Amino acid sequence: MNHYSTSPSTVKTRSAALFSAVVPVYNESLLAVEFIQALANCLRAMTPCFEIIAVDDGSKDDTAARIKALGLTLPELKLLSFSRNFGKEKAITAGLHHASGDAVLIIDSDFQHPLETVPILFERWQAGFDNIYAVRRDRKDQTLLNRFFANNFYRLNQSLMSIDLPANAGDFRILDRKVVDAINLLPEANRFMKGLYAWVGFKGSPV
C-alpha cells in the first residue's frame, strides 16, 4: 500500500510553536560547529522558536567538546553524547525521543544535506504534509559500484516489502509531531529508519 500523497490535505496552514532539528554527528570536529552555526541561522530565518539537538555518536575526536563549547553561546543547542559509537540509526532514534518540536528536521552535520532545501521542506509541512523527504536527483557524485548497489537496494525492498519505500530518499526530512510520536512508540531495537518513516504512514511529499 502506498502511504504517500503528493497533494496537500485540507489543513489550514501550520505554524510551529517549537521547531526541532536532530543532527547526528560522528568525528566531525572540523565541520560540526560551522554546520550547527549555519543551521541555527537558517532556522532563525524560518521560525523564532527552535531547538537543535546534536547527538554525538561516540566520536573519538573532540567533536563533543566543541559542540558543548558552542552551546555556551547558542542556548538553542542541546547535546546528547553516547558512551561509544552505536550507529546513525540509534543517534536519530535518541534525537527523536528528545525532540519537543511540532515539526522535527533530521539532517546530517557535514553539509551534504543542503541547507537551502530546509525552508522548502518547512513550507511543505506548513501546507499540511506530515513526512516531507528530500530525494536525490542523481548519484553522479558516487562511484558506479555505489550507484549499482543503491539502485538495486530500492528495487529489492520494493519487491520484498508491503510498503512504498521512496527511491533515493534518505534521512534528510521533516516529520510532523504525530509521525515522531508514532515512530517513538515502535519497539524495534535494531532499526532501519528509512523503512520506519514509510511504515508509519501519514501524508508524505518528496522534494
Image (cartoon, rainbow, N blue to C red):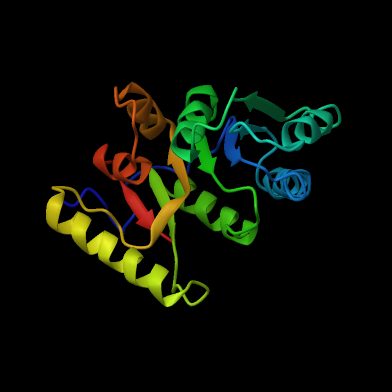
- Image quadrant assignment for residue 50: top right
In this rendering, would 159 be left or right of 97?
left
Q: Is residue 112 visible?
A: yes
In the picture shown, does residue 7 fall above or below 75?
below
In this rendering, would 139 be left or right of 194?
right
Q: Residue at x 20, y 59 (%)?
A: 156
Residue 199 image offset from top left, x and y in percent: 25, 40
In which quadrant is the C terminus drawn? bottom left
Residue 46 image offset from top left, x and y in percent: 66, 47
In this rendering, would 64 be left or right of 11?
right
Residue 41 image offset from top left, x and y in percent: 75, 47
Number of marks in the rendered image: 0
Q: Residue at x 47, y 74 (%)?
A: 143
- Image quadrant assignment for residue 111: bottom right
Q: What residue occupies the far right of the structure in this picture?
A: 73
Residue 11 image offset from top left, x and y in percent: 37, 43
In the picture shown, does residue 81 fall above or below 156?
above
62 or 173: nearer the viewer: 62
In this rendering, would 15 be left or right of 29?
left
129 or 142: nearer the viewer: 142
198 or 57: nearer the viewer: 57
In the picture shown, does residue 151 fall above or below 158?
below
Q: Is residue 102 visible?
A: no
87 or 111: nearer the viewer: 87
